[in-house]
Image (cartoon, rainbow, N blue to C red):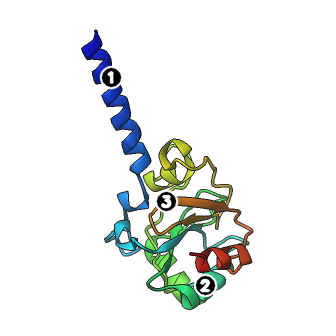
């Protein structure tokens, strides 16, 4: 009995340690071109993860996202866009159509990923991690609309979630990027 109890304690501890060690870097996603994009290549950078849509009232945020990328993107900061069609069918296009839309209308040069689902039964595993405290060890959240922003620190850990209406050039985001 004592041996079984000891084994159970070891198993529970191992499971808890594995859950706590999960980070952004544990995920590989598909780029908008269909290639694997290993998020571990972002180690040491702050990352803003945002779900996007081309036919939304908030779509003009692409302009500020690009501006933010131009000013701060590089060795210490990156933006990753995830097109999603979860809200009002506002991202109906294919990956090629989304890519063309973003480049023609907003000159998007930050990494865009393949279209995914950010809520519901088919939620992408990355967004499961972003929205579930049991996985990210920080907080529960729900993606409420297009252009919700998740702030990830240099260690790949979730720091905060910001409303879709928080603009990319908001002082809170700028301060976070510039903080140590």
Which label sits in the foreground, 1 or 2? 1
Out of 55 and 22, give the one closest to the viewer: 22
CA–CA distance between discs 1 and 2? 49 Å
The residue at which mark 1 appears reads as 8
Q: Residues within 10 Å of mark 2 (few under 14, many from 20)?
A: many
Look at the image and tell me whether residue 27 can be seen.
Answer: no
CA–CA distance between discs 2 and 3? 21 Å
> Looking at the picture, how far across and down is residue 16, in whole percent?
41, 38
Check whether the beta carbons of the residues at disc 1 and disc 3 lie within 8 A of each other: no
Name the image quarter holding residue 39: bottom left
Q: Secondary structure at mark 2?
A: helix
The residue at which mark 2 appears reads as 68
Residue 174, placed above or below residue 106: above
Q: Earlier in the sequence, mark 2 or mark 3?
A: 2
Q: Secondary structure at mark 1?
A: helix
> Looking at the picture, how far across and down is residue 59, in whole percent?
67, 75
Residue at the (30%, 21%) spot, across then down: 6
Q: Earlier in the sequence, mark 1 or mark 3?
A: 1
Q: Earlier in the sequence, mark 1 or mark 2?
A: 1
Residue 153, placed above or below residue 2: below
């Amino acid at each position: 009995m004592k041996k079984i109890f000891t084994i159970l304690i070891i198993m529970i501890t191992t499971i808890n340690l594995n859950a706590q060690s999960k980070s952004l870097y544990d995920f590989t996603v598909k780029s908008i071109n269909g290639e694997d994009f290993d998020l571990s290549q972002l180690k040491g950078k702050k990352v803003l993860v945002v779900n996007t849509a081309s036919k939304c009232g908030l779509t003009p945020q692409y302009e500020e996202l690009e501006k933010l990328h131009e000013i701060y993107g590089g060795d210490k900061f990156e933006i990753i866009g995830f097109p999603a069609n979860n809200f009002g069918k506002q991202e109906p296009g294919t990956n090629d159509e989304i890519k063309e839309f973003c480049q023609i209308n907003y000159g998007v040069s930050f990494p865009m990923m393949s279209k995914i689902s950010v809520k519901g039964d088919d939620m992408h595993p990355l967004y499961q991690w972003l929205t579930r405290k049991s996985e990210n060890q920080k907080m529960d959240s729900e993606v409420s609309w297009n252009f919700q922003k998740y702030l990830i620190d240099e260690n790949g850990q979730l720091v905060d979630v910001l409303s879709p209406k928080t603009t990319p050039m908001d002082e809170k985001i700028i301060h976070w990027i510039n903080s140590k």
